[in-house]
Amino acid sequence: MHITALYPGTFDPITNGHSDIIERAARLFDRVIVAIAANAKKQPAFTLEERITLAREALTGLSNVEVCGFDSLLADYVQQRDAQVILRGLRAVSDFEYEFQLAGMNRRLAPRVETLFLTPAENYAFISSSLVKEVASLGGDVSAFVHPKVLAALENRLR
């Protein structure tokens, strides 16, 4: 059976924590779709096209990983892409309640699709895109938390 997992998120920007989850998912599933949400509500620092480019650069070498953008209901997009799994990352217990609600809603909207959770490696568990942007905007060194191309894009954006 060919299993496709779809990993949705804003990825503004993609971090090493995201990449860790994607790399491990690429070993577990036949195909992994990194689906970057347009999500204008969050007022992202990078455009959708920039986030897609940065994710592709950070994930180079993963032959069974595809990066794309979407701007629709996740349950619809998962079914449109013929994925069987929605992959979500959990960093801390505080993420669980929100993710549990999302999983329940997606189960109602797309009953044939399962939601699976992966946790990042311990050294990435505290990293979030929001925290990386905040630290970088205040002049802090975020080089250990993002791909070098993402670091360059952050530095360029914050200049």
Image (cartoon, helix red, strand yellow):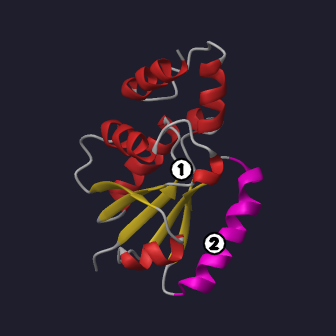
Q: Element type at marker 1?
A: loop
Q: Amino acid at mark 1?
A: Thr
Q: At numbered mark 2, what does the secondary structure look like: helix, strand or loop?
A: helix
Residues at marks 1 and 2, CA–CA distance in whole angstroms:
17 Å
Q: Is residue 110 visible?
A: yes
Give the side of residue 10 with respect to residue 77, left or right: right
Which amino acid, by three-letter code, is at mark 2? Answer: Ala
Residue at 38 percent across and 37 percent down: it is: 54
Vertical order, 101 against 91 (above or below): below
> Is 98 covered by the magenta stretch?
yes
User: Residue 19: which quarter of the image?
Assistant: top left
Q: Position of residue 144 (x, y in %)?
A: 50, 22
Q: Which residue is mark 1?
A: 10
Magenta span has 96? yes
**Who comes first in sequence, dot 1 or dot 2?**
1
| Residue bearing mark 2 | 103
Q: Is residue 143 above or below residue 75?
A: above
Q: Position of residue 87 (x, y in %)?
A: 50, 63
- Which of discs 1 and 2 lies nearer the camera? The answer is 1
- On the picture, is 55 further left or further right than 130? left
Name the dominant secondary structure of the magenta segment: helix
Image quadrant occupied by the N terminus: bottom left
Query: At 71% from the left edge and 53% from the top edge, which residue is drawn?
Result: 95
* Residues under numbered marks 1 and 2 in contact, where contact means CB atoms less than 8 Å apart: no
Residue bounds of the magenta highlight: 92-111
| Residue 128 showing in the rendered view | no
| The one of 30 and 143 positioned closer to us in this rendering | 143
Q: Return the x and y of residue 94 as percentages of the image width and height.
A: 77, 51
Residue drawn at (49%, 18%) of the image: 155
